[in-house]
Image: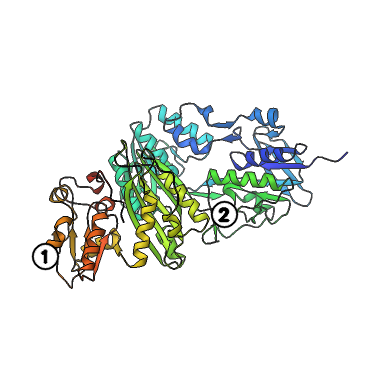
Amino acid sequence: MTAKHKIVVIGGTACGPKAAARSRRCDQQADITIIEQTEYVSSATCGFPYYVGGRITQRKSLDVVAPAYFKKNMNINLLSNTRAMEIDRQKQKVRICGVQNGQESWIEYDKLILATGSSPIGLSCEGSKLKGICSLWTMFDALKLRELVDGRKIKSAVFVGAGLIGLEVAEGLVAQGLQVTVVEALDWILPKLIDFEIAAYAERHLKKSGLQIIAGTSVVCFEGEDGWVKKVITDKGKIDADLVVMAIGTRPNVQLAADAGLAIGSLGGINVNLFLRTSDPNIYAGGDCVENVSRITQKKMLAPMGSTANKHGRIIGTNVTGGSETFPGVLGTAVVKLFDYNVGRVGLTQEQAKAEGYDVETCLIPGLDHAAYYPGARKVLLKLIVDKKTGKVLGGQGVGMGDIAKRIDVLATAISFQSTVEDLANLDLAYAPPYNSAIDPVHNAANVIRNKQSGMAKGFVPAEVQKKITAGEDFVLLDVRSPQEKENCYIEASKQTLLIPLPELCTRLAEVPRGTEIIIYCQTSNRAYQALRILKEKGYENVRFLDGSIAAWPYETAGIKPYAEQSGLPIALDNGI
């Protein structure tokens, strides 16, 4: 009788259970065992922020698969509350220990799957061990935080780090009436995921919704009282806090793999090949504990996402049962809900692209998520990053009340197939007024880039214009909106500014000086682009438009409505760029 193929999985949550389930579907005879150090084997960890914030009311809702399901429906052995202590690669067995009783034993394997996940990064400083300082990474963390919030013992909370999880949880606590502050060491929120213009647009909304953001600030230490945290000490002052949530980031859990002599990559994750096989041909690894490959740069990167972990699990389950599937890599695709706003990103940011040596072309496109005349159209602001040399799409970001995830998914698909802006501009996307505009904001973004590449248009991003204003450079800031629009909101510049509505531009050209740099803006850059074409035709040479104009301006503005986002978008958008 042929011995059963023994497959052992270390780790639950996403990759581990997925790999085990796929293994079973591929091999009905295999002996499959999952080893998980907690009682929670298959949990929706991405739902933890919404459980803590009260949006998800029942803890059991976070159980993706109940523990009993594995044995009853899948014939998979489950060793919960069991910790993997050591891997003996020569004898192909794992030493395990019961978390509660301390009993040790060995379990043999033919193929071993490591899905050990990652752990939150903390701060080693004075007061870091005080009660009330925690993270949100495990079910135990979620239960503890929910208990504290429900007990109404917490009035003020400080989040250290403005990443995805921190902002998701912070939103939930603000909704429950807590005073919440987010402290970020870098200059804007989600600093490794989005560029300044998109972050500023989102940050303004967060502040308006009651969340305090303190960026460019480092935490020095913590002060407590009776063993509980009471203050967060930063390099810029003190912040009251009954609760501190560490949300700096994560690091891969690789100790078990490293102790077994498996290769660890330069970024600290387990080194795997395209088949997700480690340096040992009988051991595979996936999820947060491994290093991935960027589909753009082909360089290693860490990508701790539940979606990636599930893809890994399926491929590993196929391969440990005789298959040969490969994983092509990741794009760092992400989306997050922040109060009424959606924020998404994919690929490289502008700064990341420059760091990789790309000469990039970018654009900022304000728009609506469906036809303006159909009720309920909502604002979006997109940023597109493209390689000037090849025209290939390198990355994209979006923010606004409208459907951002759809646009990010379109860009993720385009980048995956190495599409150019020409490809992007001509994608045959679904269209009907309740769902889209005849020309999607993604199409508009691609067309703006094409205009820039062909020389029909030149633009400045907001940061470049703000730098010129601050430095007092000599240029003309030309506003081609109506006087009423300017009264609502306008950009203040210390040098010469002009207001000439677009319909009057051709008859008032004498007011526009020649030989001086001219930067044109309007509400969304549509009229500014048209004005640029008029001036170029009339012989003006040094003319540019402000990317995104007022709708994308991330700095303070003057007027009755002092913020660009409050000035709104026009009812109808000209899609003729």
Relative height, residue 81 to residue 509 (above, below): above
Residue 433 x, y percent position in the rendering = 36, 40
Question: Which residue lies most toward the bottom here?
Answer: 515
Residue 470 appears in the rendering? no
Q: Position of residue 546 (x, y in %)?
A: 26, 59
Give the labeled residue for mark 2: 329
Q: Is residue 206 left or right of residue 332?
A: left
In this view, the residue in front, 487 or 82, is: 487
Q: How is the image coloured?
A: rainbow
Question: Circle 1 is placed at which residue position?
Answer: 511
Q: Position of residue 382 (x, y in %)?
A: 36, 51
Q: Position of residue 68 (x, y in %)?
A: 65, 27
> What amino acid does circle 1 point to?
Glu
Query: Can you see residue 464?
Result: yes
Using the image as rendered, state which of residue 460 and residue 181 is in the foreground.
460
The residue depicted at 37 percent of the width and 62 percent of the height is 450
Which quarter of the picture shows residue 461? Answer: bottom left
441 left or right, relative to 526: right
Q: How many numbered discs, if any?
A: 2
Q: CA distance from mark 1 to mark 2?
A: 55 Å
Could you tell whether 153 is left or right of 87 in the image? left
**Disc 1 vs disc 2: which is toward the camera?**
1
- Judge whether 238 appears above or below 297 on screen: above
The residue lying toward the viewer, choosing from 523 and 88, is 523
Relative height, residue 381 to residue 545 (above, below): above
Mark 2 is surrounded, within 10 Å at the Cα level, by few (under 14), some (14 to 19) or many (20 or more) other residues, namely many
* Quarter occupied by the N terminus: top right
**Residue 131 tag number:** none
Q: Are marks 1 and 2 in contact (CB under 8 Å)?
A: no
Q: Image quarter for residue 314?
A: top right
Secondary structure found at label 2: loop
